Amino acid sequence: MASVELFQEPIRRRYYAPYLSCSYLFFLLSVWVLLCLPFFLSYDTNFWLKTNTYREQPDNAYEYKILVQATGLAGSDNYFYSSVPDLNRLRGETLKMCSVKTREVDDNRDSIPDKFRLEVELPLASAESVSKVDALVFFRTQLQNKAKIVMESAIHISYDSGSAGAGLYTSGNMIFSQTHPLPVKGGYVTMYSNTDLLDPSKISGSSDGDIRTILEQISARNLTMTYKPELTHWTPVVDSASASTFTLTADIKIPTADIVYIPTAVEVLRDAWIKYLSMFVVVGFFLEKLCSFVYFHQIVETKMLVETVGSNVGVPHFKRF
Amino acid sequence: MRPTSPLAFLPLSLLLLPALVLSQVDDCEPTKHFQIDDIIGSAAAYGNTVNVFMPPGCSCKESDVAKSECVIFDCDCKCDLTAGACDMNCCCDSECTAEQTQFFTEKDLCLDPGVSDPVYETCYSPYEVGAVNPKYPMRSDDSAENAYKNLLCVQTDNSGTKGIFFETGTTRSELYPSADEAFVTGPDCTTTFDYSCWSPSATISSDEHYLLGDTIAATTGDGSTNMAAAFGGLLPLPVADQSGICNEANSVKFGEYEEEANKCKREKRASDLQNQCEELDFDFDRFTKDFYVGSTQNAKDSISATSTAGFVQVEVATVSKAGANVYDYRSTGDVLPVTTWNTGTSTCENALKSLCYEVTYNDVFNIIAVTARVEVEDIVESSSAEYVDQEFSVEFSMYGDPNTARSIENNNYVNRTRSGNPGYIFGRPVLAGRKHILNDAAVMADTSGFQVMSGVNGECDVSTGDFSASDANRGTTVGFGEDSSVGCTLSLTEAQLKAMCGGTSHTGDYLYDYSNEVKMPWWLTSMNNLTSTTKVGIFGNADPMDITQWIDVTEKAPTFSATFSDTTLTCSNFPTATHYKFQWTYVGSTTNPQAKIMSARVEYSTSPMTFLDKRVAGATQKFPFTVTVDWTYKELNSEKYSPPPPPIIFSVPYDVFYPFQIDNAAGRNGGSWIVIGLAAIGASLASLFLI
């Protein structure tokens, strides 16, 4: 009657030797190699994960704060507008009230704006002109994944034509920039909470709205949002003698950014363990073959026990090389 | 080697002397092109008349083939560009003497002859060469080994293969196919291109029905003779070019029009205004008088010099002029004014200021009428060139009832432009209006939508004392989802500030009595202060005939009372800003969400108005006023909806498979899933026995 294989299991060979023997010394050496060699093989400058990167789209919420500064061909063509009323009152004759329209576009409806559209209309009386325009737009920027931070940021839109214009169209990306990696501490961290770029509650003079001063503050920060224009078009105007409107239109895309952060201890150990283990497996494989050869052929003297039927420990088998 | 003496070139100089003299006499004209008349009589001048394959200057590489039939050839002196003379530095030029060639060679000036450098394909190893007789103390260093490179090589490949040549064919027709054969297929202009791809091609009109975006034929003339295409044969819609100047080479496209007119400028030339007035830029007759528009799309192919068949004439409906009556030919039969030049006052009277074509088409998309609304103004001649603003627009409307009956259910009682259907489209005007004064169930919707003040020139308009449509204090249309801030400034002296704070307008009557205590400028007032509460459409297709589709803009009334301090020169508690707040959300399917307005509110705020400099008498100071619009998104939870299961043969308790969810909460009678599961189990068991 034919039979079929139902189950299989290996039979082990066990090797024994006294503590004070070359075999035991070889055993210790094997253990040391098994544990340490993978570490040396996998170790390099990147073994311990000091920084890591992940991708995240910053959540930029418009703070309804904007500064617009424009100059024209004539010396008197100097205009200022802010959405902060206290700043406007301190600007005297240079104040020119603008019409500002903004819209945050969330294409994929993930509650994070993907685009930001800005339209500023600067009314001009006859003989007034605009040839250069600067705008600072303030956002509340938030990272929500690993490096959870909240901060106030501002992007700078600037263009100097040299000739009078009726409008500026610009399209570009709002890029998250960082000089140093971000710490990961679990909860949200409010960055630069003591140094607001523009605090409407602390307006004491017109210098509070000075764009250059704010830009210097931004430059001193580690984390910034930067506007990088890709497409720009300046619409010239031939008739600067009559009243008109200068229109600044900006289509700002907010792409996903690479966030560099300092990993936690758990992440560092996990990453190192993976690197170590990958070498450990290789070393262990070859070491197992080596030990098997050495012990089986009695290159170092050991006592070999082979498991057999009816015996839990097997039959001793001695062989001298 | 013998050094080359300058005297060696003396014979060459003598030879070239006549040519140099001639070139100087002939105003330095180049003398490279010979005169064929000088040598036409010489029989020796006639060359090869049969060789069509190998050009001159080349040598045949083909064996046992006559020169006239050689198609395998090579050419080896591309720097020989001057026929009949030695080309400077062209060492391969056979017209150069041996002395000249030697001179060029010694100076290392030889130009590339066009023949590739010999390739040393087989060279003896430099190490082997260096190892020959390496007896001490002789040895080879690196520089010596470099010298051994290419020392012993096979330079000339005289193998049976003479190279790889282009297959040019062996007959004249193959070598020089006719133009018809060569260009039988032009570029398809989708993957391969040439300049002809972008040449204008005649547009073939194949349909009499207009499609969206079709241009519209236009012709002008007296209707029977001398008819000719106008503005290039297309109905014009001038638009601003990159400098803002009106460009008339832009045409109306059927069914396409913008909410705002095209604004552009015309240069008012100081010495040519009369001509501009009577015939050119400011004469609106150019766009309206004896002007015909194609009623069908293919009318542009049938423009006739003697007939207007297939065309409809443009009629001027109204001519309006600021400060004068509106001349309405259509309703009252007024005699319409025309653009004329007044020599006495040097004024162009009734010059074109704005033009709007009203195009009416029928249900098969044929144009049945075109009327024009014209706005004119007087332009006075000036000593220098100036610019005048003009506006051009077009509107389309269909004549007749729509296919579906007009009803509340069909939402088409009133012809209007929707801001979405049903959900608002971002950026489209927010629908706004007030309760109808004659019918409480209807809304008087504003065709411009929800509007707030516009800061024209940046200054607040104190000239008018109401909130009329022509007032500059309104004019900024609020788009759905657009956060907006508009403002204006009011220049006041200290006394004027104090008067305004006390409720008295320093000029005109720009303060509105909101209540006994509160007065505010007209430009800050909400539309609800006039007759009734302002309403906004909940959805973008809100029907003016159904007031339930509209919600109120709830007002938070101001309670502050203005006071002026003579010590601090500060006006406190005077309204300086209006804030509109809209809350919106999405409804409907999450895959096709519809935006709607949930709630709307208006409130007012105040900030101190301090006069900064009292020392200068009569000094003015700008005080800003602002209207803002904020949109807040209200996120609603989404729920998964599954319709109740269809009736089944038997029912089981709803929680028979708890905790596994097999149905929605609405279906408490078990479900078809149970039947399907049982069927699947049965099928599995049956298959075990069948296999």
Image (tube, coloured by chain):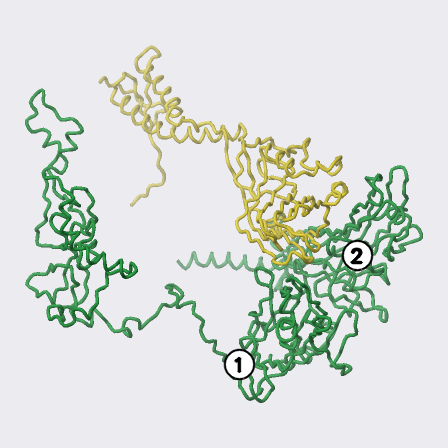
In the image, A302 versus B440, the foreground residue is: B440
User: For the residue labelled by badge 1, is the local secondary structure a helix, a strand or a loop?
Assistant: helix
Q: Give the residue pinned by disc 2.
A: B461
Mark found first going from the N terminus, 1 or 2: 1
Do marks 1 and 2 share a chain? yes
Q: Is residue A312 visible?
A: yes
> Which amino acid type is shown beneath numbered disc 1?
Asn
Q: According to the rendering, which colour does chain B have?
A: green
Q: Which residue is depicted at the point 18% across and 55% down?
A: B16
Q: Are the residues flagged by discs 1 and 2 in contact, CB closer than 8 Å?
A: no
Q: On screen, B147 above or below B58?
A: above
Q: Chain of mark 1?
A: B
In the image, B270 versus B596, the foreground residue is: B270
- The answer for how far apart the CA atoms under marks 1 and 2 are is 50 Å
Q: Quadrant of residue B671?
A: bottom right
Number of callouts in the render?
2
Q: Which residue is depicted at the point 16% across and 66% down?
A: B53
Q: Position of residue A282 (x, y in %)?
A: 35, 30
Q: Quadrant of the C terminus of chain B?
A: bottom left
In the image, A16 versus B207, the foreground residue is: B207
Q: According to the rendering, which colour does chain A have?
A: yellow
Sort mark 2 into few (<14), some (14-19) or many (20+) by Cα contacts within 10 Å.
many
| The residue positioned farthest toward the right in the image shown | B516
Q: On screen, B396 above or below B127?
A: below
> Which amino acid type is shown beneath numbered disc 2?
Asp
Q: Give the residue pinned by disc 1.
A: B298
Q: Is residue B668 visible?
A: no
In the image, A65 versus A86, the foreground residue is: A86
